[in-house]
Every structure is written in structure tokens, then in C-alpha cells.
Amino acid sequence: MSHKVDLLIIPEGYTEQQMEKFHNDCRTFLDYFFVMEPYSSRRDDFNIWAVDAPSAESGTDIPHENIWRNTILNSSFYTFYVDRYLTVTDHTLMADVASSAPFDAIIVLVNDKKYGGCGIYNSYALGISDNEYALQVFVHEFGHSFAGLADEYYTSEVAYTDFYDMNTEPWEPNITTMVDFGSKWQDMLDSTTPVPTPVNDSNCEVVGVYEGAGYNAKGIFRPFIDCRMKTNKAKGFCPVCVRAINRMIDYYCK
Ligand SMILES: [Zn+2]
């Protein structure tokens, strides 16, 4: 039991009367989580925990709609003035709740329907319960928090200029500036794959070096045309992200 990933799910914005909804939402999330690789193959390497920690009110803060809720973690949309950036900024509140169970990784399930979430490496992932993309967002955010995966997208309202230094290899395993590509997925490239790799239908399942990632259309590259770390439409994680997640599971289990 100790050689597993202890995954702790914390409810946010679920009232005492909504604990059954929390349990059902956990099941829905886990059913989705464990059908995709690498989690489907590694099901036995996880212990799942959930803490029944009720909030006084249902939902979460949405400041730009003047919605304020009294919730156990005091989460809020609009972090850094990005409307979909939903976070918990008071870590003592989180630590209080999390201390009731063992954990290696924390997921906060927010009882709301507005699109949003966040994932902070080695800290926690947070997602919403009732949005049409809730499950995809959750797994994407957990990719950030658990495996340190980068965003593979580059067109979005979350567009940072100069977020990455083009003269430095980024630390995340699934993007590269080609400064030190050997430390990334060079070993997974077929020798016939051109670099950079063109985006076309015949390359849909090909590990390559595709330009555009990490909030930049130029100079940063991703390993696959689409991936859970790029869009909500992707079928799952690309092979490079799958390997990175597997390595993190191994880190906790072996
Ligand atoms: Zn990926």
C-alpha cells in the first residue's frame, strides 16, 4: 500500500447535503481518468482517498460576476485577472483539510459549472464538476500538477509573451526549444521523421517536433499534433506525456 500513489480528492463548494453528489462526481472523474493511458495500465499503482469536508455554501467565487460563496478552501475564478483561472490561494486552508488523509497528489473538485481550473506542479490540481469539458480539464490540470507537463497549446486567451526563454531548454518534459533536445524525446523519434515535423493528416499518430507550444507559435516545439495537454478534443495524452506520467508514477511506486 505504501508503494502506491496516494491520490486525495478534496471537495470545494459542496455543502453537507451535497456530499453524495461529491461522491458521485468523484466516481465520474475516476471512471474517465482510468480509461486513458497511462492511468488505465497503472490503476493498481493508485490509492484513492476522498475527504468529506463540507462547505457552508455551494459553488465558488466568481468575482467578475459579483458571486461570492463561503466555501471551505475559499477558491476563486479570475486569478491574475484571467476569468477561467480558478485557484485556491490560501494554502493553510488546503493543508488543514488535506491533513486528514495520506496523499502524494491532491485534486480539488469544485462544485460549479463555469469553465476553469488550474494545475500547479507538486502542489495540487483543481477542476470543476459540471462543465461539459470538466473531465478533460481535470486530467489536463492533473498533468501539470502531477507530472510537471507544460501546456502544448499556443493560441488561447492565456497567451504569455516571453514566458519561456528561447535560449534555454524548458524544464518540462513535453516541450522543447531545441537547445537540449537530447534531454527530451529525441530517443522516441523515428530516423525518417523530419525536424521540424509538418502538421498534416499522415502525421496524426507520429511523434515529431511540431512548432507551436508553451504559449508561443514560434520557437517552441511539441511532440504530437494533438494531446490532452493541448486541447480538450484530443483523445488522450501523446506518447511523450504518457512516458513522463509513467516516470512520475514509478517515482512514487518503485
Ligand atoms: Zn503531450
Image (cartoon, rainbow, N blue to C red):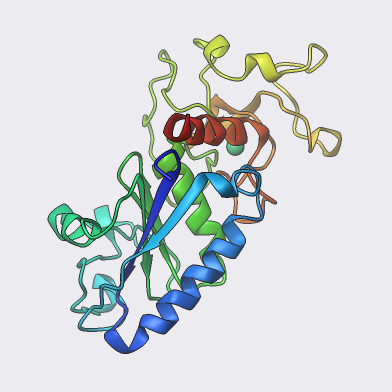
Q: Residue at x 83, y 14 (%)?
A: 192
Left or right of residue 169, residue 206 in this image: right
Q: Residue at x 86, y 35 (%)?
A: 202
Dividing the picture into quadrants, the one containing residue 160 is: top left
Residue extending farthest left? 92
- Residue 152: in sight, yes or no? yes
Query: Ligand 1 sits in which quadrant?
Result: top right
State the residue in front, 92 or 161. Answer: 92
As drawn, 148 above or below 111: above
Q: Position of residue 233 (x, y in %)?
A: 66, 55
As drawn, 200 above or below 39: above
Q: Position of residue 227 (x, y in %)?
A: 63, 43
State the residue in front, 235 or 100. Answer: 100
Left or right of residue 247, residue 22 in this image: left
Q: Residue at x 24, y 71 (%)?
A: 63
- Residue 159: in sight, yes or no? no
Residue extending farthest front? 1
Give the number of callouts. Answer: 0
Q: Position of residue 45 (x, y in %)?
A: 53, 44
As drawn, 166 above or below 82: above
Residue extending farthest bottom? 17
Left or right of residue 2, residue 151 in this image: right
Q: Position of residue 237 (x, y in %)?
A: 63, 43
Dividing the picture into quadrants, the one containing residue 178 is: top right
As drawn, 71 above or below 3: below
Q: Residue at x 45, y 42 (%)?
A: 4
Locate the N terminus by quadrant: top left
